Amino acid sequence: MPESFYTRAAHASLAENSRGRLVPEPASPTRTPFQRDRDRIIHSAAFRRLQFKTQVFVFHEGDHYRTRLTHTLEVAQVARSLARALCLDVDLSEAIALAHDLGHSPFGHAGERALDAAMRDFGGFDHNAQSLRIVTRLERRYAAFDGLNLTWETLEGIVKHNGPIRDGAGMPAGAYAGKDIPGAITEFDAQFPLDLATYASAEAQVAALSDDIAYNAHDVDDGLRAGLFELDEICAEVPLIARIVSAVDADHPWLDQHRRIHETFRRLITQAIESVLERTQRNVEALRPRTADDVRGCGEALVAFDDAMRDELQVLRGFLFKRMYRHARVNAVMAQAAGVVDDLFGRFMHDPALLPEEWGAGIGELDTARRARRIGDYIAGMTDRYALAEHRRLFDRTPDLR
């Protein structure tokens, strides 16, 4: 039986009750609205470009490390599993998971920081807001509209999967507390309100935690594979990993190191998923949401890790931050990558005629801020290898990011 007909929890999002699309479209005879969203995201150019965008390691450091695309696929797999177990709409969770990183610039967070700094006087750069720009205006595939014309529920999930971004008084909250909410979000919200002061659907919350589960687990795997740390070292500092490795060794005492690492990685994902299922069920029993809108109005996240797992993952993130994300080898490459982004932005701002025709058309008629935003859109959409190719075209020396 298709997943769209599985029994749903009372508080699940129902495709037939969707708040619709900005541009109304006839219903599909074969797919729910959320299934169509998922399919449009997969077929988008921005989704394909994730294949050559950095997760932690730039693409040519090795074929076995995660890229932004393989990370996204792992997040979507975890989201499907969680949503199905929680009797939520699997297709909506999957669509949000597949779209959550579309707005990332080349070279991972280093590229994002460089682009944000370059655009500081023009509204800055934020990958979450850029994901919204992509699916609402930058993808140009359809005859009747710009963007992908996704449902309200998928757009809400892209913007608010990590929680409300306004408080009850209308001030920026969550990731934007103490600063301005990006213009891409506020401008679209004025056109198609996304209820920025509420939590998103349970399906969007599933996508957010699936991101946490996937990147924590696969960064352990990639860090070990890259030799940035050894299994004994992470066991000494992260009790969660130490317990899992001890259990793996007890069950399989003669396991080779490669399979020992993979079994540890697999069990870490399983334990994190089980934590979410247990805590979320308790939250449902306590809060008793009867509709998807009840979830939005709970005042707290319905889908969550239990306290013990949340704290243990925080210890793991601290280890990865110190031993992987700020490792000298990673930092050296990312510093050069950030320089590539900064160079490109500066050169295009100085001479917009260097832009490709489709990006440079009419740019001389734009004010400085809109010109900077278009250049930012162009650079953000680049893959790592295309950014390097553009840098070689425009500069005499381009770093070898290895």
Image (spheres, helix red, strand yellow):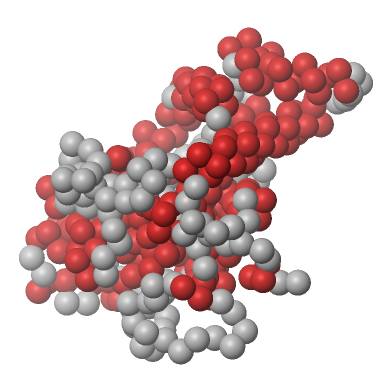
Confirm whether residue 396 shows in the render: no
Left or right of 248? Residue 364 is left
Identity of the residue drawn at 9% across and 74% down: 365
In the image, 117 versus 44, the foreground residue is: 44
Q: Measured along the vertical axis of the image, is residue 116 above or below residue 45?
A: above
- Where is residue 80 shown, x and y percent of the image? 63, 55
Quadrant where the N terminus lies?
bottom right
Identity of the residue drawn at 33% across and 57% down: 130
- Where is residue 218 shown, x and y percent of the image? 62, 37
In the image, 197 versus 143, the foreground residue is: 197
In the image, 161 versus 64, the foreground residue is: 161
Confirm whether residue 97 shows in the render: yes
Q: Measured along the vertical axis of the image, is residue 230 above or below residue 99?
A: above
Identity of the residue drawn at 30% across and 40% down: 175
Left or right of 267? Residue 207 is left
Left or right of 332? Residue 209 is right
- Where is residue 156 shown, x and y percent of the image? 37, 60
